[in-house]
């Protein structure tokens, strides 16, 4: 039986393909005799959109496991490897090339909510990486935005 994440990805891909067909149908002018490239473009856009949503869903599932860990241990685990001993932890984003998920350890539940908790190591989502913040929000950040957020997080961990 497929895992819940696999079923979600299949459903999300099917929905994205349905949107692609609808979007592709509306790309061609009725008066235009040239072939429309709307279908191919819509399919690519839908695939990118779906992969981004799957990445975000995976980050959310890791967040849920981290919160459960924190509730029973009064802290976050030292690493994602430690968390994976009790919960299924995806290795990384589904987008190719597959960026790994990196965990910023040393944080507590009472630290600022905008601290970076986990991030995808590549900027594969239209020039952005998905970042899970300590308060559970998942945001796409450019390289500059991410560098600033990570620096702020490291200062927070260091006590400054």
Image (cartoon, rainbow, N blue to C red):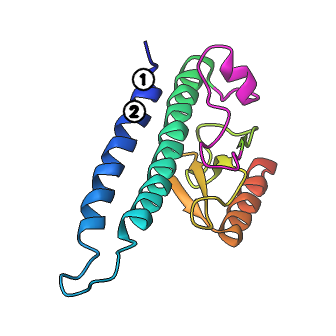
Tell me which segment is drawn in magenta: 75-99
The image quarter in which residue 104 lies: top right
Would residue 154 be found to the left or right of residue 31 on screen? right
Residue displayed at 45% across by 62% down: 45
* Residue 77: in magenta span: yes
Would residue 7 be found to the left or right of residue 138 on screen? left
Percent from the top left, x then y, of residue 95? Answer: 61, 48
Would residue 20 be found to the left or right of residue 106 on screen? left
Residue displayed at 48% across by 42% down: 54
Residue 48 visible in the snapshot: yes
Residue 137 visible in the snapshot: no
The quarter of the rendered structure image containing the N terminus is top left
Image mark for residue 4? 1
Q: Secondary structure at mark 1?
A: helix
Give the farthest residue toward the left: 30
Residue where numbered disc 2 is placed: 8
Q: Secondary structure at mark 2?
A: helix
């Amino acid at each position: 039986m497929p895992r819940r994440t696999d079923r979600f990805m299949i459903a999300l891909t099917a929905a994205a393909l349905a949107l692609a067909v609808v979007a592709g149908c509306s790309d061609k002018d009725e008066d235009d005799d040239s072939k429309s490239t709307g279908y191919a473009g819509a399919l690519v856009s839908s695939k990118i959109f779906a992969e981004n949503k799957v990445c975000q869903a995976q980050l959310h599932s890791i967040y849920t496991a981290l919160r459960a860990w924190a509730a029973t241990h009064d802290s976050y685990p030292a690493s994602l490897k430690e968390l994976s001993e009790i919960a299924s932890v995806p290795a990384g984003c589904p987008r190719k090339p597959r960026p790994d998920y990196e965990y910023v350890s040393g944080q507590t539940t009472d630290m600022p909510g905008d601290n970076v908790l986990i991030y995808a190591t590549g900027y594969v989502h239209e020039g952005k990486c998905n970042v899970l913040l300590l308060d559970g929000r998942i945001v796409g950040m450019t390289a500059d935005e991410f560098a600033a957020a990570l620096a702020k997080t490291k200062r927070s961990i260091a006590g400054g």
